Amino acid sequence: MIVSVTLNPAVYVDYAADRLRLGAANQITRTRHRLSGRGLAVARLLQTFGHDVTAAGLAGGSSGELIRAALAQAGVASGFTRIGAESRRVVRVLDVATGQTTSFREPAPYITTEELGRLAADYRALLDGATAVVLCGSLPAGLPTEIYGSLTSYAADAGVPVVLDAGGPALASAAGRGAALVIPEQASEAAGLAASIASPVVLVTDSGVQARTPDGQWLAVIGTDAFAAARRSQQAEPELDGFRDGLVAGFVPGIALGWSWSDALRHALALAASATPDGDVDLAAYEALLPEVTVTGPELD
């Protein structure tokens, strides 16, 4: 079982109005709910490829129940720690007449010390029988920046490999704790990591995906047009970055099952290029792109 952890999930509520008028009552013509949070997208993508996965983390209120229900509908098991506050929502209203979208972002819920303790207990219970853990996404209010470091250490002590996708202080506190793979949010964060930690580090370049490992550097590239199209498909909002969701999910099987770097990179890049912002994957596109990925590295030179 793979455990995918999301500590700050959200529900996107998308509305469409024929014409949005501020200060007036507006008739909504279309409504759509979708989940946000990289760990949730990773869990759904892994399930699509037939992996046994449990989505875990923190969820509360009616939004938390909607998150659990949506995951269940997608066939993904839930192991969330319940919190008293409401999981956040992002309301987006599309003005059909102008094509402009207005967003309203709720603040992240505050996590109490007692809830943090229950999260640690629930997480350690999930490690029993886990084949890999994915830690990714932003942190809600009240959680220390060291939380990813603690969760990485718990998994390492249990012999469970961790794929860490983070940035800023959360990345700094966890990068040296023995993760099996580290994927920094920013390329600039990768420069010092590869030289200071033993864990392999992955970053997206202008032409593909690079893995810096203790044995040398690997590079996976795909047709220029296909790669550029995949990168353009990223949303302006980082929480709906289908390319990165697919990239993170793509590396998990390789870490859990001990794939070669060439196989792991090929799968990860093809999945990233065929993933959508909704957390889905175009399987036909994935199958077409997989043989188009070219991998170079120390074992292949």
Image: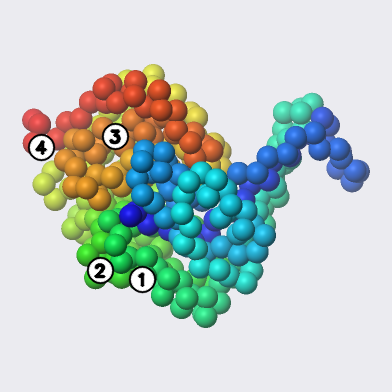
Give SS at disc 3.
helix
Mark 1 to mark 2 CA distance (whole Å): 9 Å
| Relative horizontal placement of residue 46, taking residue 177 as reference (left or right) | right
Viewer-nearest of labels 3 and 4?
Answer: 3
Residue 124, numbered circle: 1
Q: Is residue 86 above or below residue 10?
A: below
Q: Is residue 117 visible?
A: yes
Q: Position of residue 251 (x, y in %)?
A: 30, 44
Which residue is disc 4 drawn over? 298
Residue 28 falls in which quadrant of the image?
top right
Quadrant assignment for the N terminus? bottom left
Give the residue type at disc 2: Ala
Q: Which secondary structure, mark 4? A: loop
Q: In the figure, residue 133 lies in which quadrant? A: bottom left
Q: Which residue is mark 3?
A: 267
Name the one closer to the observer, 263 or 110.
Answer: 263
Is the Cβ of the residue at disc 1 closer than 8 Å to that at disc 2? yes
- x, y (%) of residue 139? 50, 62
- Kindly check if marks 2 and 3 are in contact, taking CB atoms under 8 A apart as contact: no
- Kindly identify which residue carries mark 2: 158
Q: For mark 2, does the 10 Å Cα neighbourhood hold few (<14), some (14 to 19), or many (20 or more) residues?
A: some
Q: Residue furthest bottom?
A: 114
| Residue located at (62% from left, 51% from top) | 11
Q: What residue type is disc 3 on?
A: His
What amino acid is at disc 4? Pro
Q: Position of residue 207 (x, y in %)?
A: 32, 29
| Mark 1 vs mark 4, CA separation in Å | 37 Å
Residue under the image location 29 percent in, 69 percent down: 153
Q: Residues within 10 Å of mark 1 (few under 14, many from 20)?
A: some
Residue 283 falls in image quadrant:
top left
